Image (spheres, rainbow, N blue to C red):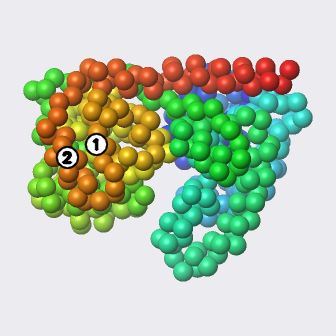
């Protein structure tokens, strides 16, 4: 069986690339198609596969400015030659599912989210853009939405990484989706004893506006409690300027450094709304509870009063109140870690195996 994966771009190892990595382990013979490929930025598991890029990769500064070529990506996808493949799995969050599958091939889409910048977060992205982008976004997004909705009909079956994303697929594409949570390498994390833990709280992940790191920093400035912020991103300088004396902004961390921070923190603070959210699962795999905004994927991974607690609005006061409640509670690190194991890589692979098998069965 010839297998092809379609991924939007391979320029780092975030959640979408972790899915591709797990699929590569399941299908070691698979070929990968993508718009832009930076081999040194991905794992050896991915780079060991044959990777073919679209014409986007040959455009100026494509490896760093690829998102500027978004309007050309539908055409680029449709030029990919997938003749001879029996199984095609597209990994969707940027444009990837819009390939033209050959007749007789099974096309499955694992959707991290319909493109946020043209659908559910269109107004947020436009609001933060410069004047020229704000002017161009409405007509370009209109064209992309039409193509995106039409290209959804080229997919035989959808899987979504959370119930949140499955609902978006129903809203924007009128398609049902099987929920398969993404793989988290939970075995790489472990709890430490209580006497080894520090007194600090942790916020980890990319520092971008929709994750609301500013709220966590301002809340802990007000609380005067220690908070460590780990991660890079477009808001790093702003967060450093916003941080008070009890907030330490470390910037990007190695995998080992992040594991230590997870294991030794009091709790992870998670003020954003994510499609799924791997960071809370990694923290729980380390035996640490999560204080999360009650929206998005966190509501599917965090069990209230067992593995963490929620706050109901994205505000400084809500975070402060949640921290106060947390400090009156107790949590069992072993039980938290055991819960996190249900989101492990092996669980993902088993669910994807069934998804593929059911897809082929439905064609017969």
Residue at 62% x, 61% y is: 118
Apparent side of residue 238 relative to residue 135 in the rendered image (left or right): left
Residue nearest the observer in this picture, 6 or 143: 143
Q: Residue furthest toward the right?
A: 103
Pointer 1: what residue?
A: 291
Separation of residues labelled 1 and 2 (CA atoms): 8 Å
Q: Is residue 335 above or below residue 144?
A: above
Circle 1 SS class: strand
Q: Where the N terminus falls, by quadrant? A: top right
Residue at 83% x, 31% y is: 105
Pointer 2: what residue?
A: 323
Residue nearest the observer in this picture, 348 or 188: 348
Q: Where the C terminus falls, by quadrant? A: top right
Residue nearest the observer in this picture, 203 or 5: 203
Q: Is residue 105 above or below residue 135?
A: above
Q: Quadrant of residue 155?
A: top right
Q: Quadrant of residue 204?
A: top left
Residue at 40% x, 22% y is: 341
Residue 2 in view, yes or no: no
């Amino acid at each position: 069986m010839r297998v092809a994966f379609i991924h939007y771009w391979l320029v780092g190892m975030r959640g979408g690339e972790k899915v591709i990595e797990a699929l590569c382990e399941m299908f070691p013979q698979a070929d990968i198609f993508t718009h832009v490929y930076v081999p040194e930025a991905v794992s050896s598991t991915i780079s060991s596969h044959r990777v073919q890029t679209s014409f986007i990769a040959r455009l100026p500064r494509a490896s760093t400015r690829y998102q500027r070529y978004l309007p050309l990506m539908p055409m680029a996808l449709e030029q990919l030659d997938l003749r001879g493949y029996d199984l095609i799995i597209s990994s969707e969050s940027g444009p990837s599912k819009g390939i033209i599958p050959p007749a007789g091939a099974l096309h499955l889409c694992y959707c991290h989210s319909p493109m946020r910048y043209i659908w559910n977060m269109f107004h947020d992205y436009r609001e933060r853009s410069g004047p020229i982008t704000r002017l161009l976004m409405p007509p370009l997004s209109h064209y992309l939405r039409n193509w995106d909705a039409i290209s959804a009909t080229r997919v035989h079956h959808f899987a979504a990484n959370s119930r949140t994303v499955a609902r978006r697929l129903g809203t924007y594409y009128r398609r049902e989706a099987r929920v398969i949570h993404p793989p988290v390498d939970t075995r790489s994390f472990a709890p430490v004893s209580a006497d080894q833990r520090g007194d600090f709280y942790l916020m980890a992940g990319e520092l971008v506006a929709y994750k609301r790191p500013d709220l966590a920093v301002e809340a802990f400035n007000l609380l005067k409690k220690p908070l460590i912020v780990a991660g890079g991103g477009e808001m790093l300088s702003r967060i450093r300027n916003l941080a008070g004396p009890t907030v330490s902004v470390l910037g990007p961390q190695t995998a080992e450094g992040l594991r230590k921070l997870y294991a030794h923190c009091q709790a992870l603070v998670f003020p954003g709304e994510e499609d799924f959210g791997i960071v809370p699962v990694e923290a729980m795999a380390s035996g640490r509870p999560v204080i999360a905004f009650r929206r998005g994927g966190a509501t599917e991974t965090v069990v209230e009063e067992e593995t963490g607690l929620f706050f109901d609005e994205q505000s400084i006061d809500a975070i402060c109140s949640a921290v106060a409640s947390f400090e009156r509670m107790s949590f069992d690190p072993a039980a938290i870690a055991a819960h996190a194991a249900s989101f492990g890589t092996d669980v993902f692979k088993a669910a994807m195996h069934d998804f593929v098998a059911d897809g082929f069965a439905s064609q017969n």
